[in-house]
Image (cartoon, rainbow, N blue to C red):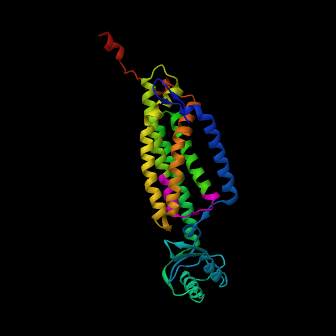
């Protein structure tokens, strides 16, 4: 896909910056649209309600479980396997004036009377709607605060063109990840929120490694064009990026496949975030810095003359 410069085997990443930028804009617009239409499928942690885990003697038929619960005033229940075909997780929205423990007993009683064999209660959890709203608000504030702190940090470490590119790349990663969750209506719980914060940190670390090399090469490659310097820097850090991303993806795929239902959302968010974050480090953060007019003069530290330096030189 990438054209190589024969002299130094530098991959010309920036040759494809325009179509990549158009792709990013398209993905962001699509994410905003789907978020405005579908919003997010908030989990029990944010909406409140009762979670009941039950175990069946034989493999459970989820359609039969849903039909049985629908006939017992729990038509809104969300039913899914939990770890294996014998264990089932049931999520029920809160009922006004009814305690979570009572809802759990009614769900268990309905399943036991549904001619599906022996059904045992494994656990029951209840989250009030007020607590759920507070968690959703605090989660959103946590992401915003993380982005603000990162903005302050990169502004102190890098020239403002690089800093702006890195912050916009982080926003790009979060919006697209949330857009995927909204489009496929994947449940968003506290583990997904933790994954989003991890994505921000992972993407920032990748971007900082690239930007450090770009800043160094701007000072070493005196006569080179900014585009070539960025291409050279990305090529030099490519092996590190591939090894880091590859090993992380292997771990996340393992978690997704055998880690159980509780961390599916966490693993999914991180998998999406790593792919998007690696892409944005190249075609969002670096490409934006070039479009903002980054040059060698911006990378050279300003020399501050000491008071009395002229007199010392004369002496």
Q: Residue furthest top?
A: 314
Q: Residue at x 65, y 39 (%)?
A: 22
Q: Residue at x 56, y 42 (%)?
A: 168
Question: Which of the pair 158/19 is nearer the observer?
Answer: 19
- Residue 223 in percent (x, y) is at 48, 19
Can you say whether 145 is above or below 152 in the image? below
Q: Quadrant of the N terminus?
A: top right
- Residue 107 in percent (x, y) is at 58, 83
* Residue 95 in sight in this render: no
- Residue 66 in percent (x, y) is at 63, 78
Q: Residue at x 56, y 31 (%)?
A: 290
Can you say whether 162 is above or below 76 in the image? above
Is residue 196 found inside the magenta-colored segment of the image? yes
87 sits to left or right of 97: left
Can you say whether 217 is above or below 129 in the image? above
* Residue 272 in sight in this render: yes
Q: Which residues are magenta?
A: 181-198
- Determine the main secondary structure of the stretch shown in magenta: helix
- Residue 179 in percent (x, y) is at 62, 54
Q: Quadrant of the C terminus?
A: top left
Q: Residue 19: name its quadrant.
A: top right
> How many numbered dots are placed on residues in this image?
0
Is residue 28 found inside the magenta-colored segment of the image? no
């Amino acid at each position: 896909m990438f054209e190589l410069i024969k002299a130094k085997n530098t991959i010309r990443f920036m040759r494809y910056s325009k179509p990549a930028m158009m792709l990013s804009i398209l993905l962001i617009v699509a994410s905003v649209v789907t978020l405005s239409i579908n919003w997010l499928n908030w989990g029990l942690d944010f909406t409140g309600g009762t979670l009941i885990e039950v175990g069946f003697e034989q493999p459970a038929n989820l359609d039969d479980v849903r039909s049985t619960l629908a006939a017992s005033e729990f038509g809104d229940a969300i039913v899914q396997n939990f770890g294996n075909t014998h264990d089932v997780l049931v999520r029920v929205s809160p009922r006004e004036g009814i305690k979570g423990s009572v809802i759990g007993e009614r769900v268990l009683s309905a399943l036991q009377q549904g001619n599906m064999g022996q059904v045992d209660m494994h656990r029951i959890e209840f989250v009030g709607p007020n607590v759920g709203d507070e968690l959703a608000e605090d989660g959103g504030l946590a992401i915003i605060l993380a982005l603000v702190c990162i903005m302050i940090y990169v502004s102190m470490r890098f020239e403002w063109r690089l800093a702006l590119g890195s912050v916009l790349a982080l926003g790009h990663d979060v919006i697209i990840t949330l857009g995927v969750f909204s489009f496929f209506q994947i449940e968003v719980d506290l583990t997904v929120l933790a994954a989003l914060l991890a994505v921000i940190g992972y993407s920032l670390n990748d971007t900082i490694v690239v930007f450090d090399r770009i800043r160094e090469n701007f000072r070493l490659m005196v006569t080179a064009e900014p585009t070539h310097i960025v291409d050279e820097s990305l090529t030099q850090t490519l092996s590190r990026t591939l090894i880091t991303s590859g090993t992380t993806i292997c771990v996340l795929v393992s978690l997704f496949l055998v880690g159980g239902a509780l961390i599916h959302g966490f693993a999914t968010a991180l998998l999406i975030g790593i792919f998007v974050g690696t892409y944005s480090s190249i075609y969002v953060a670096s490409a934006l810095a070039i479009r903002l007019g980054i040059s060698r003069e911006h990378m050279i530290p300003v020399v501050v003359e000491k008071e009395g330096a002229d007199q010392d030189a004369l002496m």
